[in-house]
Amino acid sequence: MRARKLVIGLAAATFSLATLAGQAIVIKFSHVVAVETPKGKAAAFFKQKAEELTHGKVRIEVYADSTLYKDKEELEALQLGAVQMIAPSLAKFGALGIRQFELFDLPYIFNGYEELHKVTQGPIGRSLLDMLDSKGILGLAFWDNGFKVMSANTPLRRPEDFKGLKMRIQPSSVLDAQMRALGTLPRSMAFSEVYQALRGGVVDGTENPPSNLYTQKMHEVQEYVTLSDHGYLGYAVIVNKKFWEGLPSDIRQQLESAMDQATRYANQIAKAENESAMAEVEKSGKSEIITLTADEKKAWKKVLLKVHEQMSDRIGKDLIQSVHKETGFDPAKF
């Protein structure tokens, strides 16, 4: 079935370019989260703006919630041309051999959105996106989701509370190291499988921005949610390079304008959407919300900041130091 999807998708991509003269160009935009999340809303916004600016010459087909490809499949599908646009989480690029993107998985690497945007919207972010060219991919933009919370069926207040828990993570050596630093047993699995894994006890807990936690109903099977803000989850909006460069220049410029607008929109709503989702989680009464004290958060940082040094050979010591310099972070303080 998967091979059939790839063949059909590749044929569709070829057909789109072959019919530029008379028919709308079809761009399939696949992603794995719910429509109501920041990424889901930004994808819908991009569709609206792209179709407006191109006066209907381009039709964007958005496939949300893993309806077209799961997150383990979408990068391959993009490279093969079976889908033209995706917005995978930044943890996914390590599998392509571009380990520098795992920078974003480092715990407590950013203290809020202002520090984050100095990187994603500056020269460091642009240099990272440019690394994708050699893989047949063009990086268009970074979209925020937000900062993550921890959830489990046991209260997580101090690092020792994690010991022995099975925690779901995205495929990422950095996230694996993060969870092991906390004494857990990390379990990598596709996003679409997490709810059932939590419900069935395959894993004990996980980490997510609140919007993902809430829209996937994970809070209904997790007794505790800790407001840790320990890590960041963001996305890179990427396209098949051959497809994109084969578009007429005027169409490409209009789509880039639509992407600029969608990126501003995505990053404006991310924080508010997560705050709203967290309020809904609390309102549901299904999860107890834990707010860390200053001492408790310091204990988390003391354990987790060691991962920066541990992963420096993998990600690049110079890159990590350049981010520390950009954000004004001083590891010596911990």
Image (cartoon, helix red, strand yellow):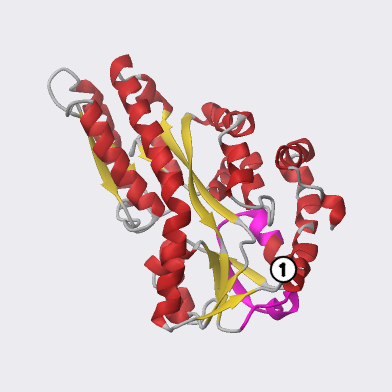
- Residue at 72% from the left image edge and 68% from the top image edge: 297
**10 Å crowding of disc 1: few (<14), some (14-19), many (20+):** some
As drawn, the residue found furthest toward the right would be 332
Regarding mark 1 in the picture, which secondary structure is present there? helix
- Tell me the quarter of the image containing the C terminus: bottom right
> Disc 1 marks which amino acid?
Lys
Question: Can residue 11 be seen?
Answer: no
Magenta range: 155-177
Q: Quadrant of residue 242?
A: top left
Q: Quadrant of residue 229?
A: bottom right
- Residue at 70% from the left image edge and 42% from the top image edge: 327
Q: Is residue 40 left or right of residue 289?
A: left
Residue 319 x %, y %: 73, 37
Q: Is residue 161 magenta?
A: yes
Q: Find disc 1 in the rendering and name its residue.
A: 297
158 over 175 or under it: above or below? below
